[in-house]
Image (cartoon, helix red, strand yellow):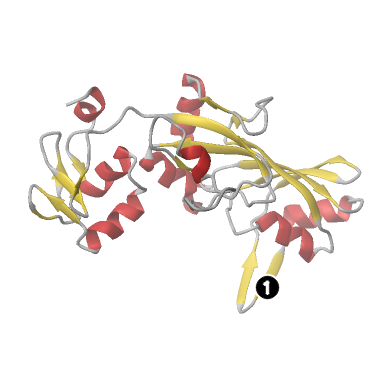
């Protein structure tokens, strides 16, 4: 039993699976509901508590001891797809498979966007960072196809609505500041699909470039596109504090 296992004995099963890096806690709960998880040779239940001597299997495959936690910052370039598809040469999978540990991305950036993407095996932290109820800040630098003005900044900050098919969406009020004639910085606490692009489109603008530069207080900085690095201890503490 490793040190990480000893530190978190007595967790609910779904939380244990998330800590293992296998998947998020929500996904682990679905696995349990679908009867795909066994504990010590019997079908597992959501109320099971787990310790380091228990045997957990998912689809008859043994879940190994909890690995050491790993937190990486990755500068996703334009053209990399965050879908995890082994047969797609543009998929993030091609980067993840080269790493020494099994990691997954915290959220996503669309293929046409670049910037900060967190990679980790801490499923619990991932779940909390993605949950909309926690209002986590994500900061983006955005370029548009034409000049912006004070009215555009005001509308973006106050809230924008848009329609996709039968679905109606509304952005939360947010902080927006001009950074140039055709560039602005925006801080979101939501993670709606292609949100900034749809917000701009609703106001008659097209996004020409979009880059995530910060999650919480963790800053992308000068990390080159396509590169990754380990988070330092202060960055990890900041994420855990906000997560």
Residue 239 lies, in percent from the top left, at 48, 32
Looking at this rendering, what residue extends furthest in the top direction?
A: 233
Q: Residue at x 77, y 65 (%)?
A: 202
Q: Which residue is mark 1?
A: 163
Residue 206 lies, in percent from the top left, at 81, 58
Looking at this view, is 29 or 21 the one in front?
21
Q: Residue at x 16, y 26 (%)?
A: 1
Looking at this view, is 239 or 95 the one in front?
95
Looking at this view, is 180 or 194 the one in front?
194
Tally the marks: 1
Q: Is residue 211 left or right of residue 125?
A: right
Looking at this rendering, what residue extends furthest in the bottom direction?
A: 166
Residue 76 seen in this snapshot:
yes
- Pointer 1 local density, CA inside 10 Å: few below 14, some 14–19, many at least 20: few
Circle 1 — which element? strand
Vertical relation: 170 (above or below) 24: below
Q: In the rendered image, which quarter contains the C terminus? A: top left
Q: Residue at x 18, y 48 (%)?
A: 57
Residue 120 lies, in percent from the top left, at 43, 36
Q: Is residue 53 left or right of residue 130?
A: left
Residue 185 lies, in percent from the top left, at 75, 42
Vertical relation: 228 (above or below) 212: above
Residue 49 is drawn in which quadrant?
A: top left
Looking at this view, is 183 or 82 the one in front?
82
Q: Residue at x 45, y 26 (%)?
A: 237
Q: Is residue 6 left or right of residue 222?
A: left
Residue 243 seen in this snapshot:
no
Residue 204 is drawn in which quadrant?
A: bottom right
């Amino acid at each position: 039993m490793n040190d990480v296992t000893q530190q978190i004995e007595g967790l609910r099963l779904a939380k244990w699976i998330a800590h293992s890096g296998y998947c998020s806690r929500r996904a682990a709960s679905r696995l349990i509901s679908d009867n795909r998880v066994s504990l010590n040779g019997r079908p597992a239940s959501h109320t099971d508590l787990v310790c380091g001597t228990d045997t957990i299997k998912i689809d008859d495959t043994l879940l190994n001891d909890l690995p050491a936690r790993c937190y990486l910052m990755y500068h996703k370039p334009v053209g990399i797809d965050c879908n995890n598809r082994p047969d797609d040469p543009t998929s993030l999978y091609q980067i993840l498979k080269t790493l020494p540990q099994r990691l997954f991305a915290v959220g996503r950036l669309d293929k046409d966007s670049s910037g900060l993407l967190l990679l980790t095996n801490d499923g619990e932290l991932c779940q909390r960072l993605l949950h909309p109820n926690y209002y986590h800040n994500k900061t983006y630098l955005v370029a548009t196809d034409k000049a912006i003005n004070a009215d555009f900044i005001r509308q973006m900050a106050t809230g924008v609505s848009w329609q996709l098919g039968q679905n109606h969406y509304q952005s939360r009020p947010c902080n927006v500041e001009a950074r140039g004639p055709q560039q602005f910085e925006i801080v979101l606490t939501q993670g709606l699909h292609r949100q900034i692009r749809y917000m701009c489109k609703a106001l008659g603008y097209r996004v020409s470039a979009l880059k995530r530069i910060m999650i919480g207080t963790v800053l992308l900085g000068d990390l080159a596109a396509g590169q990754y690095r380990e988070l330092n201890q202060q960055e990890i503490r900041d994420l855990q504090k906000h997560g």
